[in-house]
Amino acid sequence: QVQLVESGGGLVQAGDSLRLSCAASGRTFSTYAMAWFRQAPGKEREFVAYISWSGGHTVYADSLKGRFTISRDNAKNTVYLQMNSLTPGATVVYSCGGKGANFYTRGRNDYRYWGQGTQVTVSS
């Protein structure tokens, strides 16, 4: 079992960059595939990015390719989401999810473990 804690959110301006972190407890973090999701008010949680156990396989939501980068440091039990050229909008909660099976999925129900989320607000 793994517990996840996100951090790094905040209020930024349009065009800024932000790096989110998701720290995991437990010694088996390297055997969990990880993903970032986000949820805006009144909307369903949507897929942002996926990373495999080793970090060798990553997948992004089409609309975010080229601006967002997911990475992980298994020695630090942490997965990151680098977000560049942020666009203004409502406050969005970014959450990381983890699952044991090492293959790509983008369904939120496929991820067993979740953090509490971190809020990101981009002002214009």
Image: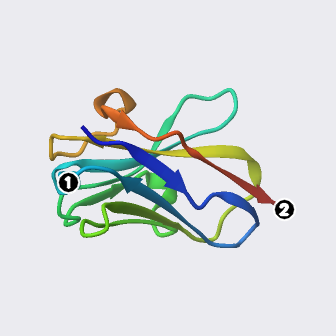
Name the spot of residue 36 as percent of width and height, x first.
43, 49
Which of the 4 image quarters holds residue 79?
bottom left
Q: Which amino acid does label 2 sit on?
A: Ser
The crowd level at tag 1 (other Cα within 10 Å; few <14, some 14-19, many 20+) is few
Q: Which mark is residue 27?
A: 1
Q: Which mark is residue 124?
A: 2
- Residue drawn at x 75%, y 50% as measured from the top left: 89
Q: Is residue 46 left or right of residue 18?
A: left
> Which corner quadrant holds the N terminus?
top left
Which of the 4 image quarters holds residue 11?
bottom right
Q: Is mark 1 on a helix, strand or loop?
A: loop
Name the spot of residue 87 as percent of width and height, x first.
70, 60
- Residue drawn at x 29%, y 31% as measured from the top left: 110
Foreground residue among 24 and 80: 24
Using the numbered discs, state the Cα–Cα distance from disc 2 to disc 1 in whole angstroms.
41 Å
Q: Do the residues labelled 2 and 1 touch (CB within 8 Å)?
A: no
Which tag, 2 or 1, sits closer to the chain's start?
Answer: 1
Name the spot of residue 29 as percent of width and height, x first.
23, 53
Foreground residue among 58 and 31: 31
- Residue drawn at x 35%, y 52% as measured from the top left: 24
- Residue drawn at x 46%, y 41% as measured from the top left: 115
Residue farthest along the front direction in this orientation: 26
Q: Which of marks 2 and 1 is in front?
A: 1
Q: Is residue 63 left or right of residue 123?
A: left
Q: What residue type is labelled 1?
A: Arg
Q: What element carries label 2?
A: loop
How many marks do you count on the picture? Answer: 2
